[in-house]
Image: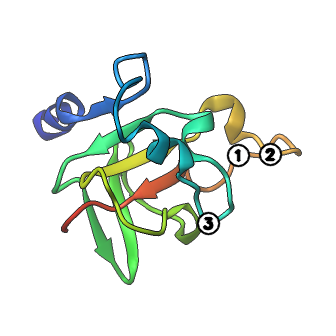
Amino acid sequence: MKLMLLNLVLLLLVRDDGRYASSPLKPWFESLRNGWGQSCCDVADGIEVVDGDWDTRNGHYRVRLASGWTVVPDEAVVQGPNHFHKTVVWLWNEEALKDEWGLIPASPIHCFLPGAGV
């Protein structure tokens, strides 16, 4: 329980509430797309993931969310260099979670940007 609370405290929202308006990385963040071709920043704010709360297992990335370890869908992984150098995960918001049939996908992860090391 203490570890989970500590992880929640350590998560830093990477959101554009105006404080990043003049950041040189703003256009780069806005250009990020997942393997489905969807913008990472359009439907959710990114959450910085501290080392130890993400890893790889059986050839797939995993992220420790509040619900536990979650496998990152291969299509959610953002390809290319990480100019931010930190790991970031974007989660689907509640409305975006539902597909055209009202079903919720198996993973809450919309985009995943791996950091410098596991």
How many neighbours does mark 3 have within 10 angstroms: few (below 14), some (14-19), or many (20 or more)?
Answer: some
Could you give the CA–CA distance between mark 1 and mark 2, rounded to whole angstroms? 7 Å
Answer whether residue 108 is visible to the viewer in this image.
Answer: no
**Mark 2–mark 3 CB contact (< 8 Å):** no
- In the image, which is nearer the foreground, mark 1 or mark 2? 2
Quadrant assignment, res 1: top left
Is mark 1 in CB contact (under 8 Å) with mark 3? no
Counting residues from the start of the chain, the first of labels 1 and 3 encountered is 3
Q: Residue at x 39, y 43 (%)?
A: 67
Residue type, label 2:
Asp
Q: Residues within 10 Å of mark 1 (few under 14, many from 20)?
A: some
* Res 22 visible: yes
Question: Looking at the picture, does residue 116 appear above or below residue 17?
Answer: below
Q: Is residue 72 left or right of residue 12?
A: right
The x, y position of residue 112, in whole percent, is: 44, 56
Residue at point 18%, 67% (across, down): 117
Q: Is residue 85 left or right of residue 88?
A: left
Question: Where residue 32 sits: x, y (%)?
Answer: 53, 52
Q: Please determine whether, in this image, residue 65 is positioned above or below residue 37.
A: above
Dot in front, 2 or 3: 3
Q: How many marks?
A: 3
Q: Which mark is residue 35?
A: 3
- Residue pointed to by mark 1: 104
Q: Nearer the viewer, mark 1 or mark 3?
A: 3
* Viewer-side residue, 118 vs 86: 86
Q: At 62% across and 47% down in the image, what residue appears?
A: 39
Q: Which residue is mark 2?
A: 99
Instruction: Depth check: give the residue in front, 85 or 113.
Output: 85
The answer to which of marks 1 and 2 sits earlier in the sequence is 2
